Amino acid sequence: MTALFALATSLLWGLADFGGGLLTRRTPALTVVVVSQAIAAVVLGVIVVFTGAWSETGDQLWFAAAAGVVGPIALICFYKALALGPMGVVSPLGTVGVAVPLGVGLFLGERPGLMQVAGIAVAVLGVVLAGGPQLRGAPVQRQAILLTLIAAFGFGTVFALIAEASTTTTGLFLALFVQRVVNVGAGGLALYASSRRGVATLPEGGFPWRALPALGFVGLADVAANGTYVVAAHHGPVTVAAVLASLYPVVTALAARGILRERLRAIQAAGAGLALVGTLLLATG
């Protein structure tokens, strides 16, 4: 169960990141985050009402609220980084954020077995190599790397927070709803402040109505990924769930290769292979 749901998290997050990065090339990152999360909040609100999830209200929702504050910051930085540099290079660097939930799991007393430790090491190395790390180049590339590192630790923090926000299925719906409402609130304030400073918040042609389905997909895929990660973390070691869920950059890189025709170098292909080997070690360990 842990491996299945964690890998589903990787798939969903990878596709959401690809879509978000693509949209950010034409629409400001902050607008992409706010609109996509607003759509997700509306859908979750309907689910919460029909499932009676309001009965799960409790102190644990503060974790969801905190994740809702950190999430938009991480997403904005990451989408900007994806827009600045090749997705196949930027995205894998985001995996360093896995150090946060891994550290939490170890602090709480989890002790993965020898095969799982080997799987963690191989998977993380593979995902980083899948980016064919290019740490030299123009200032734009260095800026993309800095933004990615900020986003990575933000994502890792969200991993750790959202896993503590619920213990039941209906509670999970409520926690994700609270997270999205805070996401939209924080992002909306930032969007308003940006517009007051004269920063462009929309593309030249106005609001991208044609991109609304894509924005909805990004928001809902992100929500679904959060949900599957919580299920994975509750059914097995957080250390294992976090590493398997962190394989999403491989999905983004492959999507960029298949759709945008970004070329994969030998080191990237080798990294993807190592990530697969690490996944198998974790799943069987």
Image (cartoon, helix red, strand yellow):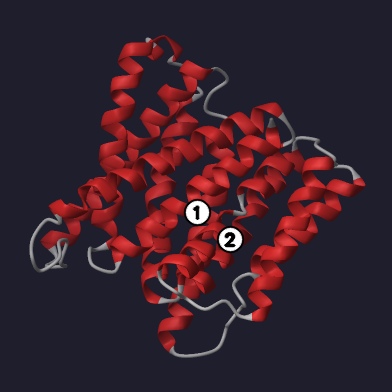
* Residue 14: image tag: 1
Disc 2 vs disc 1: Cβ atoms closer than 8 Å? yes
Whether residue 76 can be seen here: no
Whether residue 224 can be seen here: yes
Image coordinates of residue 201 in percent, x first then y, are 17, 61
> Residue at the location (61% across, 35% down)?
5
Left or right of 154? Residue 127 is right
Image coordinates of residue 235 in percent, x first then y, are 69, 27
Image coordinates of residue 258 in percent, x first then y, are 47, 66
> Residue at the location (80% across, 37% down)?
110
| Secondary structure type for disc 1 | helix
**Where 193 falls versus 213 (above or below)?**
below
Mark 2 vs mark 1: which is more N-terminal? 1
Residue 4: quarter of image: top right
**Where 131 falls versus 55 (above or below)?**
below
Under mark 1, the amino acid is Gly
Under mark 2, the amino acid is Val
Left or right of 64? Residue 212 is left
**Where 103 falls versus 81 (above or below)?**
above
> Residue at the location (32% across, 12% down)?
50
Image coordinates of residue 77 in percent, x first then y, are 40, 62
Q: What is the number of callouts on the image? A: 2
Residue 193: quarter of image: bottom left
| Residue sitting nearer the eye, 194 or 55 | 55
Left or right of 78? Residue 101 is right
Count residues near mark 2 (Cα–Cα under 10 Å), then give few for <14, some for 14-19, many for 20+.
Answer: many
- Quadrant showing the C terminus: top right
> Residue at the location (13% across, 60% down)?
195
* Residue 250: image tag: 2
